[in-house]
Amino acid sequence: MQSRSWTKRLGVVVAAGLIASACSSTATPAPTTGGVPTATPTAAAVPTTGGTTAAAAMKIPSAPVTINVLDVAGNLQLTKQMMENFKAKYPNIVSNVTYSTATAPELAGKLQAQEAGGGSGISLVMTGTDGLSAGIKNNLLTQMTPDHSDMFPGLMDNYLAPAAAMQGLAQGFGIDVVYYPSGPLYEYNPSKVTTPPTTPAELLTWAKANPGRFEYARPANSGPGRTFLMALPYLLGDSDPTDPVNGWAKTWAYLKDLGQYINLYQTGTTATMKDLANGTVDMLASTTGWYINPIILGTVPKTTAVGHFENMTWVTDAQYAVVPKGVSADVLTADLDLIAWMLQPDQQAFSYDNGYFYPGPAVKGVTLDMAPATSQTAIKAVLPAQFDTWINQYPKVTSLPADTQVTAFNMWDQQIGKK
């Protein structure tokens, strides 16, 4: 895995430790005035890819804060340990971190209610492109860059190239903390699917012959669902894969045809995995991480197989840290410190986790041998050898921009999901 040629091309370069060097930095206590810490920043020398150093300021809030994290992407599987590490190391910044979860479609409503009520219950949100899109569209998020770029020196240079492209989708309202090539892949029960499809046309033929046995979840709340949706225009040769309104004629027609043979669009990916495991369906849309992780967790059998379409284009995915509008200055300071901490290479290594977002790291030079031993063992036991070949072989494009994703999701809900 460490020898993937795309990683070699990018260069095995240790990413800048955006708060401090990955090996040796520490935060020093803030100076105090009358016993109360002031907001004077602490600077640490940070190696950059050019071999020089930059001053990354860790800013200290006036008093330690509680950060209330809302996860709408399953992201805590990848980043919770990073947050716990930060809390343990910097009690002068964070007194506690709490965690809650919701679905991506619920995010906008929760943040709107918080803003209208003048509350600050949600301090930090971990989201995929779906929640990010809704947050940007509804003007609910704090501008992160360029407003606070001083907290993230060399940000774009330190990212893997596809992760840097995904960062562009945030429009400055979020920071990409994990990345993966995503899909489109599919997984299946090999005892039921003896001739796996190699094209969308073959999938449609199989679904017609096996009604109700293929499934994918609602794209607005499913990584595999939205990856499948955004990949089809490339697979089908649509006129403009970036324009769901005017350029997806073949995709919408295909999904309507396919929908005739789908019994249910689940509201999330986990439900589709359970359907595959219990035999309700025999094949479903998937991604690299959604294939690996449920096998490790025992959600689906180890005998489950994975496939891909010929001449596919990877639609890459990422998850972001975003800050709701209206948080206090102290909470914002702590949020920025925490996000920068999560981009340090030694913390990024935790994102390998159990393969949920395989590979996971967004920054350069973070290899599986840097991950916890448990992650290394679990992933190596189930990682398909062909994943590296597919990642090298096929081109990669970013997910749709935030506003375009919202448009595509709404069109799917109206034209496909409701029928």
Image (cartoon, grey):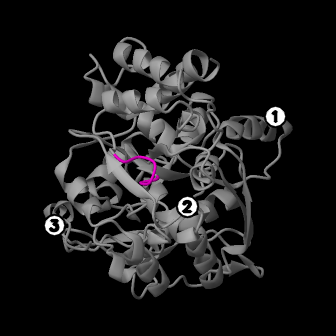
What's drawn in magenta, residue-wise?
189-194
Query: Helix, strand, or loop for circle 1?
Result: helix
- Asked whether the viewer can see residue 128, the reply is yes
Q: Main secondary structure of the magenta part?
A: loop
Q: In the depicted view, which residue is nearer to us: 217 or 275? A: 275
Which residue type does callout 1 highlight? Ala
Residue 116 - label: 1
Q: Which one is closest to the eye, mark 2 or mark 3?
A: 2
**Among the 4 quarters of the image, the one containing residue 291:** bottom left
> To which residue does mark 3 refer?
8
Tell me where residue 419 appears, x and y as whole percent.
62, 17
First along the sequence among labels 3 and 1: 3
How far, Cα to Cα, is label 2 from label 1? 42 Å
Asked whether the beta carbons under mark 3 and mark 1 sit within 8 Å of each other, the answer is no
Tell me where residue 245 appears, x and y as whole percent.
43, 14
First along the sequence among labels 2 and 3: 3
Tell me where residue 43 appears, x and y as whole percent.
45, 75
How far, Cα to Cα, is label 2 from label 3? 33 Å
> To which residue does mark 2 refer?
300
